[in-house]
Amino acid sequence: MSHLQGRGHCQSCGIRHLSIFADLGAAQLGSISAFHPAVVGYDSGEVIYHQQTPSNNAFTLRHGLVKLLKVLPNGRSHIVRVLRRGDLFGFDGFAGEAYNHTAIPMTEVEVCRLPLTELLDLKKQLPEIEQSMMIRWIVHLREAEDMMVELGAKKAGERLASFLIRWSNVDRDAAGWVELPLSRAEIGELLGLTVETVSRFMSEWKRQGFLQEQRGTIRMHQVDELRRLVCASGSC
Amino acid sequence: MSHLQGRGHCQSCGIRHLSIFADLGAAQLGSISAFHPAVVGYDSGEVIYHQQTPSNNAFTLRHGLVKLLKVLPNGRSHIVRVLRRGDLFGFDGFAGEAYNHTAIPMTEVEVCRLPLTELLDLKKQLPEIEQSMMIRWIVHLREAEDMMVELGAKKAGERLASFLIRWSNVDRDAAGWVELPLSRAEIGELLGLTVETVSRFMSEWKRQGFLQEQRGTIRMHQVDELRRLVCASGSC
DNA sequence: AGTGGATTTTGATATAAGTCAAGCTTTCCA
DNA sequence: TGGAAAGCTTGACTTATATCAAAATCCACT
């Protein structure tokens, strides 16, 4: 179950430097009296919010991973984005309008819940927040455009290789291992492929030594080799 | 060739009500002395700007249609967005950074060219512009998410039907006709399909009476019928 | 009006990826 | 600890869509 972990205190927040509040001074934060964030926990698979539901809160991800997905009337669904520490989400509709997608944790997560109306006020008052949000939108839009190219112009192996390579370039440890807490089904939903196709490619690459995996953790080898093999003249 | 049509005068601009300057009063516009927009024309197929090129200007489309596309190193390319009257584009990088995509007119167009640094200043000064840009980003991001679902979770016929239906709901005349100045190849690049696939579906639907076409203009019939036929239980 | 080039259509064929089905592993918890 | 559920792998088969190729049509320009 989701559970309230307590009232938020931005001043002492461990991930503030990753959030839209990164550029605020302590004084500025202290002076905000009408702001009421709350730290909330969710288990993997719970629903943080559901598409078509009125949006009253935005969220900042404190730790764990969240997927944003859209479900079609016929049951098919597609993951439109995977969120990481510090990401802002749920601010894709205007206050009171419906969320455009569903947000579900892929691990245990902790989020900071921000009432939308308060966030909008804050944004108006503090140009730093404004600016920080604008930058996020731009980056975010770039990523969306890149993803459209992946989906529209690349084939299965290319999409999967480029996803795994990108993923393994973030947060990998000294030995090159990265957590990959996505099921094959989820990778499929993200890349527009079936579970079987994802599984086949990954098995093949493990056999060929491009990929190691143990308990939800992976390590990539000879990335350039893999690229040369899978991606026709620079398609990924 | 592209050609300068003259210095812009926001006050008298015919599409200002569609632009990011829609909510400004005449007085506010008049008071902006340091702003130097220019009206520029381009022919179909010219390059307005090229991906990887430093971004110094943003643009507002005055009339005609522009495609934003990304080209992969291997020559494949994908259209990530089609722009209409009033749309702002080229503001996807920060001043001086590279554009993330290439902008090419699909018809003769006229654009208003806005120096990025000036636009950024203006945005800082006038909350109306700020607000208007934020709304555009949100809408835009929604559209991008929707498009990812199209590409990732739907098949050829579903994508094409939903594209044609959406398209024909904008700017159609009293008799239901809409201009469609995209070649089959461009529709394919937008939807992740080949020319042949696009052509086959459209021919079939013409035969079946769902679609009429003459000289770059189309008209849809019995949309609900088509949907029922093509889209498995509500997939489009 | 007539010719040449581009675009579109149509057909035949190939193939990547989906579907269906069965076994195999891992994980979870009773 | 063991047994069920969930997730993953593998195989055989089907199919949607790409690819290749050739007509047919449309359009632009003398």
Image (cartoon, coloured by chain):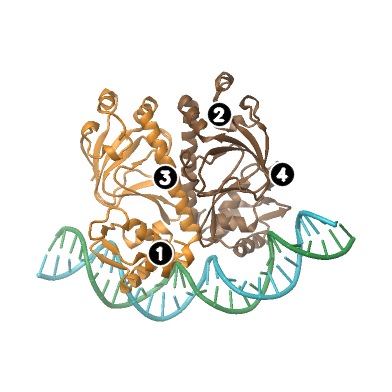
Chain colours: A orange, B brown, C green, D cyan
Three-letter amino acid code at the position of disc 3: His
User: What's the CA distance linking mark 1 and mark 4?
Assistant: 43 Å
Q: Which mark is residue B89?
A: none
Residue at disc 2, secondary structure = loop
B219 vs C26, left or right, is: right
Query: Compared with residue B175, is residue B70 higher up or lower down, i.e. above or below?
Result: below
- Residue located beneath label 2 in the image: B21
Chain letter belonging to callout 2: B
Mark 3 closeness class: few <14, some 14–19, many ≥20 residues within 10 Å: some
Front tag of 4 and 3: 3
- Residue located beneath label 3 in the image: A140
Front tag of 4 and 2: 2
Q: Residue B175 carries which label?
A: 4
User: What's the CA distance linking mark 4 and mark 3?
Assistant: 40 Å
Position of residue B76 measured from the top left corner of the image (x, y, whole percent): 54, 60
Tags 3 and 1 on a common chain:
yes
Tags 4 and 3 on a common chain:
no
Mark 4 closeness class: few <14, some 14–19, many ≥20 residues within 10 Å: few
User: What's the CA distance linking mark 2 and mark 1?
Assistant: 46 Å
Q: Residue A194 carries which label?
A: 1
Residue plotted at (39% across, 38% down)? A91
Which comes before the other along the chain, label 4 or label 2? 2
Residue at disc 3, secondary structure = helix
Q: Is residue B180 visible?
A: no
Q: Do the residues labelled 1 and 4 touch (CB within 8 Å)?
A: no
User: What's the CA distance linking mark 4 and mark 2?
Assistant: 33 Å
Residue plotted at (40% across, 66% down)? A227
